[in-house]
């Protein structure tokens, strides 16, 4: 049984978040009624001509700079010719030999914490195609060209990934980056972020690449991982039983969890690329690049590094909190209120209770029902011992569902922690008196019963007794 | 070097053009003469000059501001469409 | 007679209210009615719209508005999109196509007060040199209706020559304005590439197409070009260079003008053609111009170069005609492939299909370098050689066509013979240079043209040189028999 090495390259199509299309002034908003956002240019009417959207160029340059790539001073638009109903001109305006963004790279952090650099071969601008719909049309398809002409940035990686997990880590990194840069909303359900995976295998140590298959339109991280895993197994099986992998395009079937052949890449059209004569060379000068560079936000890696050093967070925590600009901003707002010394506490709560609530209710951080100031207010009450961490969770739930602030909730529900030793002692005495058997068992060596007594004290105090004090006093009284 | 019938069929397919049995020999013949005629080009010495992209020298692509300027005109645009249903352009089933 | 007057003279009459635009329009509509059955120069006549536009022009004139084209009728080649009016490109593919918008050229002439009489017949999708490939039948040359008017703008040329309109628009990709102008005895100008907007012109070969005008004199052509030219933000290849006042420089004396004579143009030129050009040169010399011999060694490659580049671009430009969103659709397509192949196979004529296939071939894998890339290199060389020539001379002068108008049906069997008609005109398209043809005499009773080619954006000088020639000669004043 040979030792197989997996080789993966990803082509990501990120829809750029411009207001209008790349070559026409039609709107790009998602979900509009069919063909209501298809202008004459998008419909490829006779006589119409493309004019390039400045913002699409700016966004491409932003991306190039953030992956350390060279931005081409001069790039050329080319026509990719093929016939398909969702491609009205019968060609797609893309870039071929001279893309706007050239060689770059992106660092990804793997599960075990190691950092790997994935090369980015190029990124280029092109236009999206329309959509074919099949429901309700017998033996026919309905074409909606609203999406035709939406700007895409096609990001091509080097075949540097060696496992499905690495591929997902890279894809997630690119996803985070394009959202940071505000060039793409990353909404995979709506199709704004699509991934094609080129997968092949080769015997470990072999220099030559094996024949690859392209798996198209993977629109979730999970599907990318599963599709690659399936495909690798499929290819290995073919080779080990004496067959040859066919170079082809495949689709991932999410219901059957398998990839199936779409059309052979050999049969696929000869695209007959040539420079588009309706467009002139795109020239980008140093001044423009410098100006775009000055508008770059702090990038995810920079923010994570800063969180680690500035707030003493672990690389993992720093990574989670910098996964989106909004989350990072939220975290920093909380830290600003509670102090850098308490950054770890803030981190735990943002990554813990807050994130759980957001996920549970399907809410984005920007629409969080608990503002940074409210959370900070709650954390302050933990820090000054007004409430215990456990009670704080209850307060948080109220904050989330009812709003208001920590102090008001603590007062209204009488959740203040009991820190009066005398009061706690009195309660402990009552419980000990009420549970002579457990006392005897504990004293004869059953340490586990300590938990029982703690539980009883908390029950009697509705959880408000200061846990540390309960511990100390119980230890004294039980011994 | 003339074109074979097979080559012409392949080109016609790529270009999505139906050519009838009767017409095919005529196309093979005329395309062959055209290709022979332009083959003179392949033999010519063009040295090291860069291929021309545009007759306009020193000009570059103008950029357009990112503004929505178009409104929904689909009813007007679809007035002449061969087949439309629920504002969709209808074609025979597209098989992925 | 109203149809013998220049645009300037008509404008004067309209300005003095001696004639109204409606009267003028009726006059030309009547001529169309009387003469066009024999010529077949129009695909669509827009009588009602014309009269409405004329009435509108009259209201503007009444308000005291002036303009050199205000109230004056014209014809548009059926390649220009005209809103609400069929725009067929001479093809079955667009026989049912009513354009939902106006081309920039159409918009500009309309706001200048032009009154559109109709859409002119043309070679299908602008591919041809004789107007014999039109779905709507061939156009006849008013000088001899057994002869072709030239192409692809044959309808615009024939109509202007027959005085069915004072002027007509055309497009020129490989000679499609200059060649028909020569064969029908009128003046036609193709401006510099990028001078006139291509927005709304059904694209044939994007890097070669240019819109221009047919008129009966360079002075008239100058007036029309003034209104057509200028930057258009909707066309990325439109150049933002100011439009000079063409009329103002028409009167400039030609003393010291250096005219280049291309060796390659005169090589093998028929004796009678040479004689006409010599006669024209004598006129130019008498006006103070001098001649210089120049050579463009790579110019002989221009025809094969053109017949690689133009088909390549058109094969891609015409892919949008697929029976899906507009235009011809075949009956009962059984699947998608059938829809495409039969809509296109039935919608396009043979010449169009030939060029699409030639283009597909030269762009295809394995042939791209040998043909397309090579052709673009040759094109660069030819352009460089023109540029070098223009450092020595101000204008180039030569024939427009090898022969006068040939018989309808004479050349349809062999595409190459037809393609060689463009031998003198193609160079200017490849290099994007302005070119003009005007009548300079006749051979066998049929008109012949003289061609002037200028450097980029030198339309003013080209028109000036043509105008001065026309002041000293009267070839341009001659009318075909029966159309006086």
Image (spheres, rainbow, N blue to C red):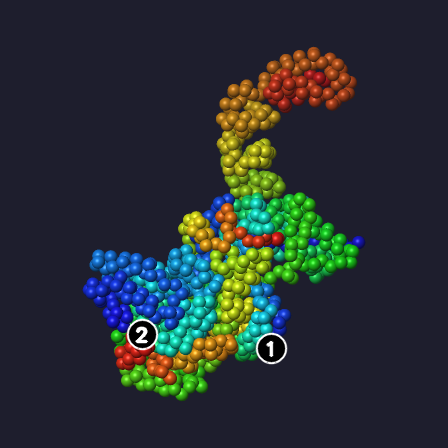
Secondary structure of the residue carrying tag 1 is loop
Residue B63, quarter of picture: bottom left
- Where is A479 relative to B72, above or below? above
Q: Residue beneath label 1, please?
A: B1
Look at 51% across and 52% down and name the residue there: B83
- Where is A369 relative to C409, above or below? above
| Same chain assignment for discs 2 and 1 | no
Residue A85 image position (x, y, % from top left): 55, 55
Let me know if residue C110 appears in the view: no
- Looking at the image, which is closer to me, A177 or A141? A141
Residue C317 image position (x, y, % from top left): 49, 63
What is the chain letter for disc 1?
B
The residue mark sitting in front, 2 or 1, is: 2
Look at 59% across and 73% down and name the residue there: B25
Secondary structure of the residue carrying tag 2 is loop
Look at 77% across and 55% down and name the residue there: A240
- Looking at the image, which is closer to me, A266 or A291? A266
Residue B55, quarter of picture: bottom left
Residue A221 image position (x, y, % from top left): 62, 45
The N terminus of chain B appears in which quarter of the rendering?
bottom right
The crowd level at tag 1 (other Cα within 10 Å; few <14, some 14-19, many 20+) is: few
Residue C279 image position (x, y, % from top left): 33, 85
Q: Which mark is residue A137?
A: none
What is the chain letter for disc 2?
C
Let me know if residue B52 appears in the view: yes
The crowd level at tag 2 (other Cα within 10 Å; few <14, some 14-19, many 20+) is: some
Q: Residue beneath label 2, please?
A: C483
Look at 75% across and 57% down and name the residue there: A239
- Looking at the image, which is closer to me, A48 or A244? A48
- Distance from Cα at disc 2 to Cα at disc 1: 49 Å
């Amino acid at each position: 049984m040979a030792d197989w090495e997996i080789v993966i390259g990803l082509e990501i199509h990120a829809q750029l978040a411009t207001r209008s299309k790349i070559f026409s002034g039609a709107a790009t908003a998602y979900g509009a009624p069919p063909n209501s956002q298809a202008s004459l240019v998008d419909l490829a009417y006779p006589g119409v001509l493309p004019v390039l959207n400045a913002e699409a160029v700016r966004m491409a340059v932003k991306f190039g700079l953030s992956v350390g790539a060279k931005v081409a001073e001069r790039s050329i638009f080319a026509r990719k010719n093929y016939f398909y109903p969702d491609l009205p001109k019968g060609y797609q305006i893309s870039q071929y030999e001279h893309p706007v963004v050239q060689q770059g790279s992106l660092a990804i952090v793997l599960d075990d914490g190691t950092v790997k650099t994935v090369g980015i071969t190029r990124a280029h601008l092109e236009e999206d195609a329309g959509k074919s719909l099949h429901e309700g049309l017998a033996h026919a398809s309905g074409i909606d060209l609203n999406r035709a002409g939406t700007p895409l940035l096609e990001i091509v990686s080097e075949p540097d990934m060696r496992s499905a997990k690495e591929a997902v880590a890279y894809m997630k990194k690119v996803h985070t980056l394009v959202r940071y840069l505000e060039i793409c909303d990353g909404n995979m359900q709506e199709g704004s972020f699509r991934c094609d995976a080129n997968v092949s295998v080769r015997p470990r140590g072999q220099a030559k690449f094996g024949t690859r298959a392209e798996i198209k339109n993977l629109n979730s991280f999970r599907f990318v991982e599963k599709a690659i895993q399936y495909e690798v197994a499929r290819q290995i099986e073919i080779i080990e039983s004496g067959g040859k992998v066919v170079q082809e395009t495949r689709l991932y079937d999410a219901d059957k969890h398998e990839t199936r052949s779409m059309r052979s890449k050999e049969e696929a059209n000869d695209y007959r690329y040539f420079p588009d004569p309706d467009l002139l060379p795109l020239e980008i000068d140093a001044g423009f690049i410098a100006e775009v560079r000055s508008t770059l936000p702090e990038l995810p890696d920079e923010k994570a590094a800063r969180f680690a050093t500035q707030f003493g967070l672990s690389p993992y925590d720093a990574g989670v909190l910098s996964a989106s600009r909004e989350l990072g901003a939220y975290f920093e707002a909380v830290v600003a209120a509670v102090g850098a010394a308490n950054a770890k506490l803030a981190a735990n709560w943002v990554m813990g209770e807050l994130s759980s609530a957001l996920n549970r209710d399907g809410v984005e951080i920007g629409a969080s029902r608990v503002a940074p100031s409210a959370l900070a207010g709650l954390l302050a009450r933990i820090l000054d011992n007004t409430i215990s961490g456990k009670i704080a969770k209850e307060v948080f739930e109220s904050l989330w569902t009812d709003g208001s602030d920590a102090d008001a909730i603590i007062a209204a529900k009488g959740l203040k922690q009991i820190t009066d030793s005398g009061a706690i002692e009195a309660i402990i005495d009552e419980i000990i008196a009420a549970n002579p058997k457990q006392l005897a068992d504990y004293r004869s060596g059953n340490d586990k019963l300590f938990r029982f007594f703690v539980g009883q004290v908390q029950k009697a105090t509705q959880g408000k007794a200061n846990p540390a004090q309960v511990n100390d006093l119980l230890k004294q009284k039980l011994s | 070097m003339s074109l074979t019938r097979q080559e012409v069929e392949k080109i016609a397919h790529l270009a999505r053009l139906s050519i009838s049995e009767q017409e095919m020999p005529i196309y093979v013949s005329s395309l062959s003469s055209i290709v022979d005629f332009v083959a003179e080009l392949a033999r010519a010495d063009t040295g090291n000059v860069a291929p021309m992209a545009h007759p306009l020298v020193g000009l570059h692509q103008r950029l357009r501001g990112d503004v929505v300027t178009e409104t929904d005109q689909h009813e007007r645009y679809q007035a002449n469409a061969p087949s439309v249903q629920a504002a969709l352009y209808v074609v025979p089933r597209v098989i992925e | 007679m109203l149809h013998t007057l220049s645009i300037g003279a008509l404008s004067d009459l309209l300005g003095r209210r001696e004639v109204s635009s409606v009267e003028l329009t009726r006059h030309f509509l009547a001529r169309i009615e009387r003469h066009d059955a024999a010529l077949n120069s129009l695909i669509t006549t827009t009588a009602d719209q014309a009269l409405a536009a004329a009435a509108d022009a009259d209201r503007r004139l009444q308000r005291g508005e002036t303009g050199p084209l205000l109230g004056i009728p014209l014809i548009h080649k059926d390649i220009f999109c005209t809103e609400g009016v069929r725009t067929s490109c001479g093809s079955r593919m667009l026989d049912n196509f009513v354009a939902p918008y106006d081309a920039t050229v159409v918009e500009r002439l309309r706001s200048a007060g032009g009154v559109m009489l109709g859409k002119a017949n043309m070679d299908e999708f602008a591919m041809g040199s004789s107007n014999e490939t039109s779905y709507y039948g061939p156009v006849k040359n008013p000088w001899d209706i057994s002869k072709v008017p030239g192409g692809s703008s044959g309808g615009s040329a024939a109509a202007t020559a027959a005085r069915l309109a004072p002027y007509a628009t055309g497009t020129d990709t490989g000679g499609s304005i200059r060649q028909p102008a020569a064969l029908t005895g009128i003046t036609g100008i193709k401006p510099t590439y990028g001078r006139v907007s291509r927005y709304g012109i059904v694209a044939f070969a994007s890097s070669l197409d240019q819109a221009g005008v047919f008129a009966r004199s360079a002075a008239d052509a100058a007036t029309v070009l003034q209104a057509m030219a200028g930057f258009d933000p909707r066309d990325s290849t439109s150049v933002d260079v100011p439009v000079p006042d063409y009329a103002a420089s028409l009167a400039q004396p030609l003393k010291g003008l250096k005219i280049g004579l291309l060796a390659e143009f005169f090589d093998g030129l028929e004796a009678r053609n040479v004689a006409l050009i010599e006669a024209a040169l004598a006129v130019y010399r008498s006006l103070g111009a001098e001649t210089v011999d120049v050579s463009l060694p790579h110019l002989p490659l221009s025809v094969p170069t053109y017949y690689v580049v133009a088909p390549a671009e058109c094969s891609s430009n015409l892919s949008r005609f697929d029976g899906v969103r507009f235009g011809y659709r075949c009956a009962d397509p059984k699947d998608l492939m059938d829809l495409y192949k039969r809509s296109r196979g039935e919608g396009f004529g043979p010449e169009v299909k030939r060029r699409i296939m030639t283009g597909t071939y030269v762009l295809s894998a394995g042939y791209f370098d040998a043909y397309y890339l090579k052709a673009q290199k040759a094109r660069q060389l030819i352009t460089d050689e023109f540029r070098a020539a223009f450092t020595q001379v101000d204008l180039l002068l030569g024939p427009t066509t090898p022969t006068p108008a040939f018989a309808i049906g004479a050349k349809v069997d062999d595409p190459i013979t037809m393609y060689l008609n463009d031998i003198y005109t193609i160079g200017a398209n490849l290099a994007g240079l302005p070119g003009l043809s005007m009548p300079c005499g006749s051979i066998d009773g049929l008109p012949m043209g003289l061609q002037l080619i200028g450097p980029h954006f030198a339309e003013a000088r080209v028109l000036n040189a043509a105008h001065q020639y026309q002041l000293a000669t009267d070839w341009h004043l001659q009318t075909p028999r029966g159309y006086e």
